[in-house]
Amino acid sequence: MKLGLGLYKHMLTPDNFDFARQCGATHIVAHLVDYFHGGKDNPAQNQPTGGETGWGICNDTELWSLDLLLSLKQRINDAGLELAAIENFDPAHWYDVLLDGPKRDEQMEGLKILIHRIGAAGIPVMGYNFSIAGVAGRITGPFARGGAVSVGMDGTFDVPVPNGMVWNMVYDPDAPKGTLPEITSEQLWRSFAFFLNELLPVAEQAGVVLAAHPDDPPLPTLRKQPRLVYQPHMYQRLIDINSSPANQFELCLGTMAEMTEGDLYDFLDTYTKQNRVAYIHLRSVTGKAPHYRETFIDEGDIDMVKVIHILRRNNFQGVVVPDHTPQMTCSAPWHAGMAHALGYIKALMDC
Ligand SMILES: [Mn+2]
């Protein structure tokens, strides 16, 4: 297994590449979606939280070019690191794939072009989250050890998604007033199956693995929209839809620990043995959705020693990144949190 650091678009800088290396990371997971653009509710330097108005406004209507992907990889390689994955499609590129809207087929062709480019750039994994409401409804407070500011949830979030927004971002600021129609879980699974069956053959050909993040927070519905993977056993349905070796998980263990059913360690053991885990988001929590808190990596419900032991035993070859951490009280809250998490994971890996 390998140690990586996830960086948001505005953080893909030489200083942060040096920081990752200094912490012992060898890989970068890069976000190219500018979540924070125009978002008024997001804290600087933290994970986007947003509110009813979402994270931000899409500002990247053009598909990412091969040149952009190649230069990103080159900058990361020049810093002595590997680019392990791109995380998340831009909602501007696939909103009607998520919503089964009129531009679905056209946008699906765009995603295929994008996957070809990602493969041509030598980037092995594309992480994504097939979700209409996205990550929403969390609260922020001094929930972690020593009063470190962290996120959590205190009950579900039912405010409907406004028209022109999907996956927490506004793709059409001029959309007519009103909210997205409510759909059933089966309708959402049908849209998802279409996406998988269209894109997986292209991904295989391009040498790219598609890695699915579970629903965070894991609830049957959020903002009156259905969710796909909100209990561990629901991940199996992805594989049942299409057993391509390119059909894998962006396994978020914090999200898995927020689920009310199943055994996290059995799940991890089963699917790493089957080569279904592309890479791992490692963080801890206390509690279960919709009542939980994100914690420091060493104080939550997950037995991290057991997790690393399973990964080692199954010869897991993917990258482990810290996902989020609480904000530490100092002049660099994000970096201090990440340095702590990376050091902790690296020590477990070295044991
Ligand atoms: Mn995650």
Image: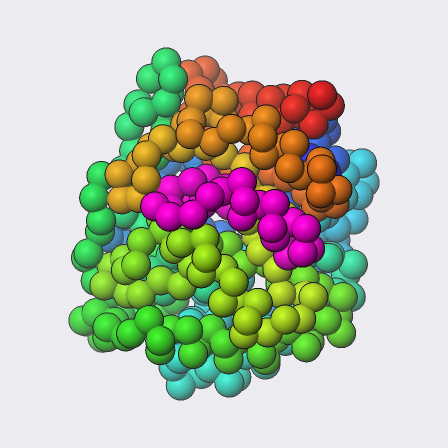
Q: Residue at x 29, y 74 (%)?
A: 184
Query: Percent x, y for residue 46?
Result: 43, 35
Q: In which quarter of the image is the C terminus?
A: top right
Q: In which quarter of the image is the N terminus?
A: top right
* Helix, strand or loop: magenta stretch: helix
Q: Which residue is drawn at 46% across and 57% down?
A: 233
| Relative to 8, residue 297 above or below | above
Q: Which residue is drawn at 63% across and 71% down?
A: 243
Query: Percent x, y for residue 288?
Result: 32, 40
Q: Residue at x 37, y 48 (%)?
A: 261
- Residue 14 visible in the displayed image: no
Q: Is residue 276 magenta?
A: yes
Q: Give the left or right position of residue 321, taking residue 80 as reference.
A: left
Q: Nearer the viewer, residue 71 or 248?
A: 248
- Residue 313 lies in quadrant: top right
Query: Percent x, y for residue 171?
Result: 38, 66
Q: Does the magenta stretch include residue 286?
A: no
Query: Percent x, y for residue 87?
Result: 57, 53
Q: Which of 33 and 296 is in front in this view?
A: 296
Q: Give the magenta part as a residue range.
A: 252-277
- Residue 21 visible in the displayed image: yes
Q: Give the left or right position of residue 280, taking residue 293 as reference.
A: right
Q: Give the left or right position of residue 184, taking residue 123 as reference.
A: left
- Residue 66 lies in quadrant: bottom right
How many labels, in total? 0
